Amino acid sequence: ARLGFEIEKRTFDAIASHAGELASVSAARVGEEIREMLAHANRARAADLVEALGLDGAVFGPRSARAGRRLDALPAEVPGGGWTTALAAWWLDRGGAEDGGARGRAVSELRRRLVLSNEETDALDHALAIREVLLAGFASLGVAARARLIARHGFDAAVALVGAGDAPLGAALAAQADRELPSRALPHPLLDGAGLIAAGYRPGPRFKGWIDLAMDAQLEGRIGSVAEALALVREAEERA
């Protein structure tokens, strides 16, 4: 796939006839090969060969027809996720279900079959989960909710997955994120736990809610100082 070569027919047939023997090969070894394939710009060609040879069962289990071509549409350098984003695109191309339960089961199965690290598993899961939110209506979220989503690990990978299926939508989402939170990180909070303690509040379960309240107001531009953040907390305390 890297060199654009074809496999000689007798060799191709021999590989296909022995495809079932991959079941006896170390899952970690299979995972390493898949990492190399999907990290390369010619990843879609590699996936086509894997499927044509009947080797895909070692990756995805029981075979299913490939219905999409998101893997082909990913850019050579995948933003925010690398090979795990390509794996997510491949799974979606094969009819990956559009619900969280199916996603969770698929991620667990891919982790087992490819011996994914915790970091790789999280990258795969986050990209697919955030993609679901983006498709459900990113624009309908409030300013603070959008900023929090943009700052999440896996956002750019999710945008790449959306763009692989709908290029105009992917471009629009990327442009909006670049306008609203180009750093992909939330600003330094005006109010944190130390600030609440300094203001005389005793640590407790309410702290997180107050800090989130202040951050939302900060993101929405409703407050711009520690004093205003504390005033917001006092108001919330009085209403409670």
Image (cartoon, rainbow, N blue to C red):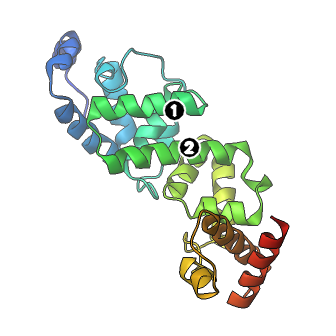
The residue wearing badge 2 is: 129
The disc, 1 or 2, on the residue closer to the chain's N-terminal end is 1
Q: Quadrant of the N terminus?
A: top left
- Helix, strand or loop at label 2? It is helix
Three-letter amino acid code at disc 1? Answer: Arg
* Image marks 1 and 2: residues in contact by CB distance under 8 Å: yes
Q: Quadrant of the C terminus?
A: bottom right
Local packing at callout 2 (Cα closer than 10 Å; few below 14, some 14-19, many 20+) is some
Position of residue 139 measured from the top left corner of the image (x, y, whole percent): 77, 55
At a point 35% along the width and 43% down the height, the residue shown is: 42
Q: In the figure, is residue 8 to the left or right of 110?
A: left
Three-letter amino acid code at disc 2? Answer: Ala
Residue farthest right in this picture: 239
Residue 40 shows in the view? no
Q: In the figure, is residue 239 to the left or right of 114?
A: right
Position of residue 13 measured from the top left corner of the image (x, y, whole percent): 21, 13
The residue wearing badge 1 is: 103
Q: In this view, does 86 lie above or below 82?
A: above
